[in-house]
Image: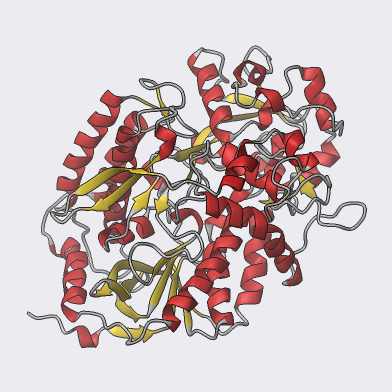
Amino acid sequence: MSLDVNEIQTIEHDVLVIGAGGAGLRAAIACSAHKLNTGVLSKSLLGKAHTVMAEGGMAAAMGNVDSRDNWKVHFRDTMRGGKFLNVWRMAELHAKQAPERVRELEEWGAVFDRTKEGLISQRNFGGHRYPRLAHVGDRTGLELIRSLQDHGIHQGIDFHMEVTALEILKDGDRVAGVLAYRRETGRFVIYKCKAIIFATGGGGKAWPVTSNSWEYTGDGIAMAYDAGAELMDLEFTQFHPTGMVWPLSVRGILVTEGVRGDGGILKNNKGERFMFKYISERFAPETAATEEEANRWLAGDKTARRPPELLTRDEVARAITAEVKAGRGSPHGGVFLDIASRVPADVIRRKLPSMYHQFKELAEVDITKEPMEVGPTLHYFMGGIRVDADSQMSTVPGLFACGECGAGMHGANRLGGNSLSDLIVFGKLAGDGANDYIKGLGSPPKANNEQIATAVRRATEILNREKGTNPYILHEQLMETMSKGVGIVRVKEELETAVTELEKLKVDAQTMKAPGASQYNPGWHEALSMRSLLITSEAVTRSALMREESRGAHTRLDHPGESAEWVKYNVIVKKAADGNMEVEKRPKPEGHAALVAIANAKIEDLESGKVGADYQ
């Protein structure tokens, strides 16, 4: 029986934004401001984005709390945090434009915490030299989403909620639309458009312990790969050092870095403040070596160096892992995060209200009286779809990416707080880039009916099998493979084993079965997500196998330390002509000489204007 594509509901937009988190909403607002007919696809409900989980704040060098801060110091911190693998231009654009984007949010109604002078308050965070994170208690991501939604719904944008994108439709090399389906009814929808902006996040659900919820299955990364886009830096998967570890029902839920930024310290089961033992050579000049100096810094002494608890996330996550492996962990396999003994209870409840209620309700722990048990949780993808820094367009004409699914901004390790400002900076740039692309397009692209029919059959064959692989069991096997072989620390043999196991899972996935009809069928949703998860997981694993050094969030026990050779390369993943995954070691473009000088400068030379004064 032939499939009549013309009977499938078709919706047309100039530009389709896929993902309704901070990046997607900001991109949609930018597109609408250019008078483009704009649609937003949301896999879940509007307001249910992962952006709300970003609690601590958004990094922007506004200098409201410490006037010494500026974009050059922020840029320097970002490059050093990313171990110099960041795309130079992206880190520059982010540092320069973040303050303006934050002030724009305020104009749209965001209610930030305030200094005594009435300015937007900024807090300390790991890897940032100065208090830089504009915040709303520990609910900053929620306020960001609220502000963008309240502004965006008045801009003539069409929102399509609980719709999952399945495949990019193309006209030759150019994008022409997307095939999607409504999660509630199982009905397919064809979205025709001239440009697509992916803001789909990462793929944390490939790991068993993650701060990510069910939506994070690498859909954008996998669809872009299948459409011919290049992926980059996927070996760098960030394990946030502090996720909840107990009870098991909440394992992996994020504990904001704001707890440490506001004075919390990490202790092992001997009561030792262990982070002083794990200060690497690169960060030693700027990190307190004694408890006395760390306490002076928290008290506001500008001559003191910052506490070791505020080292970059990769450093702290490795330190916690080392303590647990050495037998000095907490009862449930983490360490203790103590703020109760250092900060008054009323201050904790005022500055960290979400954390107070989260532990009280989910773990029956009062963080104003007792320490929290925390441990690393898969949190963020530094890598993703390779894009042009200024326009955010991928290597596929008309396909753009911003936010977590785009690569380049964060290098080998993201600094806390840089994600929220990343969303609004690159979300806007993606919207502007899509507008420029559409203006110069010429004849509009047309979707190919045969491609649509093939994609529909590929999705529905899962429902039409009499027997086959259970997608839930397949997902459990995938998580076990990634946990064992592609965790916080990695070695060649385990990565090779993971690749072999992933190849077997890919074969099993070809016969996935979900019983029942397409309406209200969670098994079918799971099976469709598994395709994205397997592509994303393979790309991460093969990239990790290729990079033979330890840098940022990628730690190879068989290749310890950073390599002066490997910093010159990015690992690129793309789909080969035969359909197999191709992994390439590609030379990294050099940065502008002035930017290189700023990133390598001593902080006193930067502050005095001895370095970087002429570069604006």
Q: Is residue 127 left or right of residue 209?
A: right
Q: Is residue 485 visible?
A: yes
Q: 268 and 415: which one is in front?
A: 415
Q: Residue at x 19, y 81 (%)?
A: 449
Q: 140 and 234: which one is in front?
A: 234
In this picture, is 32 found above or below 532? below
| Image location (x, y in percent) of residue 506 | 19, 46
Q: Residue at x 26, y 71 (%)?
A: 173
Q: Residue at x 14, y 52 (%)?
A: 468
In this picture, is 613 found above or below 558? below
Residue 317 location, quadrant: top right
| Image location (x, y in percent) of residue 542 | 28, 39
- Specify how the rendered protein is coloured: secondary structure
Quadrant occupied by the N terminus: bottom left
| Image location (x, y in percent) of residue 219 | 36, 58
Quadrant occupied by the C terminus: bottom right
Residue 90 location, quadrant: bottom right
Q: Is residue 41 left or right of residue 332?
A: left
Q: Is residue 56 visible?
A: no
Q: Residue at x 42, y 21 (%)?
A: 560
Give the number of marks. Answer: 0
Q: Residue furthest left?
A: 1
